[in-house]
Image (spheres, rainbow, N blue to C red):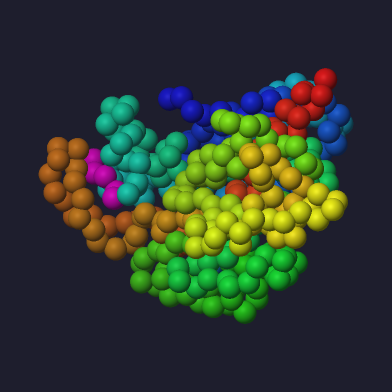
Amino acid sequence: MAGNSFGQLFRLTTFGESHGVALGGVIDGCPAGVELDLQMIQEELDRRKPGQSAIVTQRKEPDTVEFFSGVFEGKTTGTPIGFAIRNTNQKSKDYSHIKDSYRPSHADYVYDQKYGFRDYRGGGRSSARETASRVVAGAIAKQLLKDIKITAYVSQVGALKLDKNYNQLDFSVIESNPVRCADMEMASQMEEYIKSIKKEGDTIGGVVTCVIQNVPIGLGEPVFDKLHAKLGEAMLSINAVKGFEYGSGFDGVKMKGSEHNDAYNTDGTTKTNRSGGIQGGISNGMDIYFSVAFKPVATVLQAYDTINKEGEKVTTQGKGRHDPCVVPRAVPIVEAMAALVLADYTLLARSNKI
């Protein structure tokens, strides 16, 4: 299986399965001397871990990260950083009923067709549990970036959508509600809606919006390595993601060019920011903002029709512990992937100046 690495200079390779012994990763290219707050890294993992509230999967995992290399006396050494997160609460028997059949909209069928074999326990490598490793790496990338601030929040659940611009929201309330919405009134509505969906044995999708502030001018490479293209790749690599837009996004098509253009101030900043902080694939110093759409979780706790390995029609039912809505736990994952991209391009910018 290829495709387990991300990044050029700041490069993460992940390993592990949902119900295996552990998940983990190796970070290659992190500079030496970066002071690491290990508690901050664990706190980022805690934001992603299961069982944190009534509206997420009730799988109980401590998600404690162990570092094996690349860190000494609280600083990075410049050598590969190896780490692991042990699985402690697997219930593989919950998946025995799908050993020989395929869950709709999951990776089950294509894994079997591509590899001729699959780990059906929790989806194996295709499980969103793999993203725990990304959060560890993203937390280290955030500490490398220092002044760059990355903030993500839930802006939509189903049809419930924030109608405010990000600069009208209170980011300080994001971690004070289980949905991780930046508006407490909307957070309450979203929470009740997710609970009602869960009672039905069903799932619902949503949108995570991310804002990156204090980005220097010049990150990104023209043509194939545009900054927004790499951010899109990063976000689309996250499980359940179905869409990515930055700046004015799809709404921009409703505007005329004279309306859409970002006029300059004399200091090089722009009066508006419909470009989303990126022009020509290169950061322009304005805030970068984008949104990521997540589909409803594919596993529903209802009876459904599908096929088995022999191509026969069968009826089965979802079992086990699953998120009724993935977006509350996706917030730190979106931030982590954004941090990996920014760290990589920061190092690339430094190398270009040598």
Image-quadrant location for residue 125: top left
**From the viewer's perspective, is 312 left or right of 330?**
left
- Whether residue 136 is visible: no
Percent coordinates x, y for residue 7 in the rendering: 62, 30
Q: Residue at x 42, y 69 (%)?
A: 198
Q: Residue at x 58, y 31 (%)?
A: 223
Image-quadrant location for residue 109: top left
**From the viewer's perspective, is 45 left or right of 213?**
left
Q: In the figure, 181 relative to 6: above or below? A: below
**From the viewer's perspective, is 138 left or right of 232?**
right
Q: How many marks?
A: 0
Image-quadrant location for residue 219: top right
**From the viewer's perspective, is 341 left or right of 159?**
right
Q: Residue at x 83, y 33 (%)?
A: 34
Q: Residue at x 69, y 29 (%)?
A: 10
The prevailing secondary structure element of the residues shown in magenta is loop
Q: In the figure, 104 relative to 186: above or below? A: above
Percent coordinates x, y for residue 181 in the rendering: 62, 67
Image quarter where the N terminus lies is top left
Image quarter where the C terminus lies is top right
Percent coordinates x, y for residue 21 in the rendering: 52, 35
Q: In the figure, 332 relative to 11: above or below? A: below
65 is within the stretch colored magenta: no
- Whether residue 206 is visible: yes
Report the span colored magenta. Answer: 100-104
Q: Residue furthest left?
A: 312
Q: Residue furthest front?
A: 258
